[in-house]
Amino acid sequence: MKKTFYLILIAMLIILVVVFTLQNSDSVLIKFFYLEFSSSLSLIIFLTFVFGGLVAIIALSPSMIKDSKLNKTMRKKIKQLESQIEKYLESEKKSKEKKQDLLETGRDKADDSSGNLYYKQ
C-alpha cells in the first residue's frame, strides 16, 4: 500500500516537472560578473533548485555527523546497560534460589525432646 502511494506520488511529480519544463522553455540570458550565457528558464530554475539542495546538505552535514556519532554511542550504552540488567536479574534469581533452599532445609530439620536436631527424610 505504501509502495503504491509513493509510486503514484513520484509519477505525479514527474508529470509536474515535464509540464513545467514544456511551459517554461523560453531562453533566458544569465549574467554573473563577467560571464554571460543563455539557457532555458526551466533548466536554470532546476539547476538553482539543485544548488540550493546541495548547500542545505553541506550546511546540515556537521550536525548530521554529530547526531550519528551520538546515536552510535547511545546504542552501545544501551547494550551495556541491558547486559548489566541481565546479570543483575540472574544474580537475584540465584539469591532467591539460595534463600529458598535455606528455608526448605530449615523446615526439614526437627527438634526432638532431647534437643538433638535431625533431618526429616
Image (cartoon, helix red, strand yellow):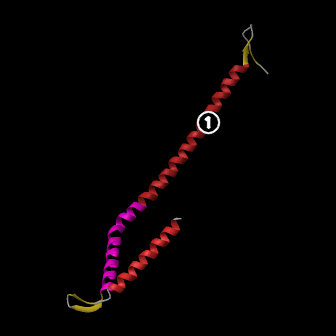
For residue 80, side relative to residue 95 (left or right): left
Please give the name of the residue rendered at 63% of the width and 35% of the height, measured from the top-left corner: 94
Residue 98 sits inside the magenta stretch: no
**Which range is magenta?**
41-68
Q: Position of residue 4 (x, y in %)?
A: 52, 69
Amino acid on which the number 1 mark rests in the picture:
Lys
**On the image, which quarter does residue 121 sit in?**
top right
Horizontal and vertical percent position of residue 64: 38, 64
- Dot 1: element: helix
Q: Residue at x 32, y 88 (%)?
A: 25
Q: Residue at x 43, y 75 (%)?
A: 12
Q: Quadrant of residue 68?
A: bottom left
Which residue is painted at 36% across and 84% down in the image?
21
Rate crowding at label 1 as few (under 14), some (14 to 19) or many (20 or more) other CA atoms within 10 Å. few
In the rendered image of this protein, does residue 111 appear above or below residue 82?
above
Relative to 85, is 59 above or below? below
| Residue 62 image position (x, y, % from top left) | 35, 66
* Residue 45 within the segment the image draws in magenta: yes
Residue 106 placement, left or right of 73 = right
| Residue furthest out toward the top | 113
Residue 35 lies in what quarter of the image?
bottom left
